[in-house]
Every structure is written in structure tokens, then in C-alpha cells.
Amino acid sequence: MAIILRFFDCQGFIRERFFKIVSVPNTTSQTLKDEISKVLTMYNLQVRNMRGQGYDGASNMRGIYNGLQALFLQECPYAYYVYCFDHRLQLTLNATAKGVYEIWQFFSTLSLIVNFVDSSAKRHSALQAVRKEEIADLIACGQLQTGIGANQVCSFQRAAATRWSSHFRSIKSLIELFSSTKKTLDDIIEQGPLELQGEAVAVLKAMRSFDFVFCLLLMHKLMKITEVLCQTLQRKSLDFVHAMKFVGHTKSFLQEMREEGWDDLLSELNRRFSDQTSELLIFSSTLDPRDNFRNFKIEDACNLAKKFYPEDFVDNEMFALELECAYYEKDMRSDPKFQNLESISDLCRMLVQTRKLEFFPMLYRLICLVLTMPVSTATTERAFSAMNIIKNRLRNKMEDEFLGDCMVLHIEKEYAESIDNESVIKEFEACGTRRVRFS
């Protein structure tokens, strides 16, 4: 189990730090809860001070009664759980693709083409040679411009079941290599080994079919839209109010595709990314600084603190917050430095840079609490990807133990930017707060 801490530093920047890898005997919610609590207690981080938690959508994590998030909420009712946005998008795209036979068949054929042409080093080299000739001919005809780094010979990208972005890269690579792939298959049919000719004929026939080419172009157009959202949701500094804005933009771009037969996709996005996700989200959106703080409402800001963070604001601080809000609204809308902010994260940093956090300490505290809310578990996933190198690639090497130690050091440098938890704790404590969410 990988544990990631999310907090913000004294300059108002959101930080996500790889903190610890824990070996667990099983993945039941109670076991995970006990191990996480043990790690936090070891470094004097109290569970009651948690203000957010984020995991994927497995039942042992998101279960409303006995899931990991529910167990922590019993101990700390303000550790609000947010189901990883990036996982939700992956599930949406997978569910809708499987629900449309033609699209399911398209991805199966795409995988067949990539595996046949790219699984053999000889066929891979043949494809590269054909593509180089094509590029040379296009340059000679004036259809391609030359320059440093231009006209690189690309290769096929394989799609991974759990990474929807890889499907988009696979589609892009086939579109670029379409004519080269056709020429390579023709050469195999004419001159290749007899046992491959029949398979090459079947692959070429499937690749040239109207249904496949239509879906290839349609999915490329569709996934250019969803790819932006997919990459955005994996950013470390993204706050979840801004994330929901991007979801809304994506749905509006897809709205025009309804008449093309994509009602199922839009319905799935609406179900998993409802605008009414939670009351917490609605109240938090009042802090959004875009359009000259158009969404800011004093009542919503006070209700956000009163209803969701009562332990962080005592009675006299709630009164101070209400007084600050009126001055804050007028001051923000009249200060040119705050006119073009795009997110709550930008707002937080600008308050630090202009030292206005000293004039609005209660609002600054509220903003920081909202920023601890998770959007995705991408940092945790990257940690697992690095761990996979140790578990698989290095396992069978004679120097396994030495390389394993080196890789652990590499992981900690890459994800924690330090080689021990104490330095992460010092950085965390230097921020003047112990509010945290973890994945």
C-alpha cells in the first residue's frame, strides 16, 4: 500500500508527497485503516485532523458502510471522501465503449493490427523502413516541411486496459502509420512467409473495412476532447472545483455529438460527474476567483465553514469570517492583481504573494481547507508504476538486491523529493498546518 500526503506550503502551492510503502497481509478496509492510522500516529499526524481522503472506486475503499472511507469518517467526520475523478472518467469511457458493439469491435481490431505488425522485430523494422520512404517522398513533393525534430518516424502505441489515454495514443499512431501499415501488409502478402500471408490478408481486410475506418476517425475526434480532461485530472495542483469546471466543458463539447449517436456517453458522464455531486462542491465553488469573483457569496462562504469545517472555526472565528467576507468581496473585485485568476490554487498563491492573507486569515484558512480536497489518485498510481519496476523488471536479475535498493531511493527522490519521511514531516510542519488528505 502506498501512502501519499497532500497539503499546501507557505507560498500557497499544493504539494503531494510520496510518504511510505506499507506491506499489508490483505486489502480489507479494516486492515488498510489500521495500517494507515499506525503510520500517521508514528509521525504524530492525528486522524482527527484529516480533511480529505481519496481512493479509487473499489468496494473496499468507497463502501458507504464498511469501506475504508466510511471507517475514517466514523472517527473523523470532516475527512471528506472524493472518489478519484480520473478513475471515474476511465470507467465512463470503458463502460460506454463496451456498450456499443461497433466500438468494442473497433478496439479489438485495433489491438489485432498493432499486435500483428509490431510483435515481430522483423515486421516492425519493415514498417519503419516503409514509413521512412513515405516521409522522403512527401518531403520531395513539398507536402512536408523540414526542420529540427520534424518528421520523426513514430511507432505503434499499445493500449493498456486501465489507461484510456493509451487508447488515444494507439489511435493517433495508426492514423499516422495507416498507409505505411497497408504497404507493409501488402508486402507480407506478396513476399512474406506462407504461414503469415493468410493472417496478413485478414488483418488488412479488417483494417480497410468501412466500419473500422469510420470508427477510427470518429474515436480520434471524440478522444481529442476527452484526452484534455484525462490529462487535466492528473495534475497535482488541480482543485476539485476547477476539475468539475473541466468536466462541464467536456460535456458541452460532447453535446453537439448527441445527434451522432453518442447519447450513451453523455448519459454516463452525467451519471458519474453530476453537477450536483455534493453540497460541499456547491459551497466550495463560491471561492472560485474566475470572472472577477462572480460566484462569491458571503452566505455560501459562511455556510461552507459552518457546515463542513466546524472544528476549524470556533464561534468568534465564525463571526470574524463573516466580517471579513464583505471586505474581501469588495477588495478582490477592485484589485487588478486578482482580475485574471483561473483557479482557487492561483487565488491562494496570490493571497500569499500580496500578503493579503494577513487581512483575511479566516478566508485564507477556508481556502486552504478546500484545497486539501483530493481530485485524483494519480500520484499514488505513479508510485505503483515505479514499484512495478522493482517487483517485475528487477526481480530476476542477479544484482536484484542492489538494484532494488537503488530503485527505492529513486522512487523516494522522484515522489517525495527527499530520502526520508522526517524531511517530508518538516516540510509539512513548516506550512503551519496539520490538515491533510491522503491517498
Image (cartoon, grey):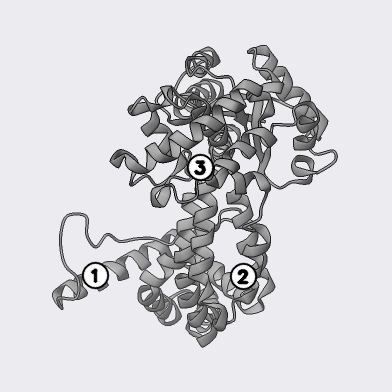
Point out the tag, 2 or 3, that comes first from the N-terminus: 2
Task: Name the residue type under label 1.
Answer: Ile
Front tag of 2 and 1: 2
Q: Badge 1 local density, few (<14 within 10 Å), some, or many (20+)?
A: some
Determine the image quadrant of residue 433.
top right
Q: Which residue is mark 3?
A: 287
As rendered, which of 426 and 101 lies closer to the eye?
A: 426
Q: Which residue is mark 1?
A: 135
**Looking at the picture, how far across and down is residue 74, in whole percent?**
81, 30
Asked if residue 377 can be seen in this view, the reply is no
**Looking at the picture, how far across and down is residue 282, in whole percent?**
61, 49
**Residue drawn at (42%, 24%) of the image:** 359
Asked if residue 226 can be seen in this view, the reply is yes
Which quadrant of the rendered structure holds the N terminus? top right
Q: Secondary structure at mark 1?
A: helix
Which quadrant of the rendered structure holds the C terminus? top right
As rendered, which of 420 and 34 lies closer to the eye?
A: 34
Q: Badge 3 local density, few (<14 within 10 Å), some, or many (20+)?
A: many
CA separation, marks 2 and 3? 30 Å
Q: Secondary structure at mark 3?
A: helix
Q: Is residue 199 above or below residue 79?
A: below
Q: Which residue is mark 2?
A: 265
CA separation, marks 2 and 1? 37 Å
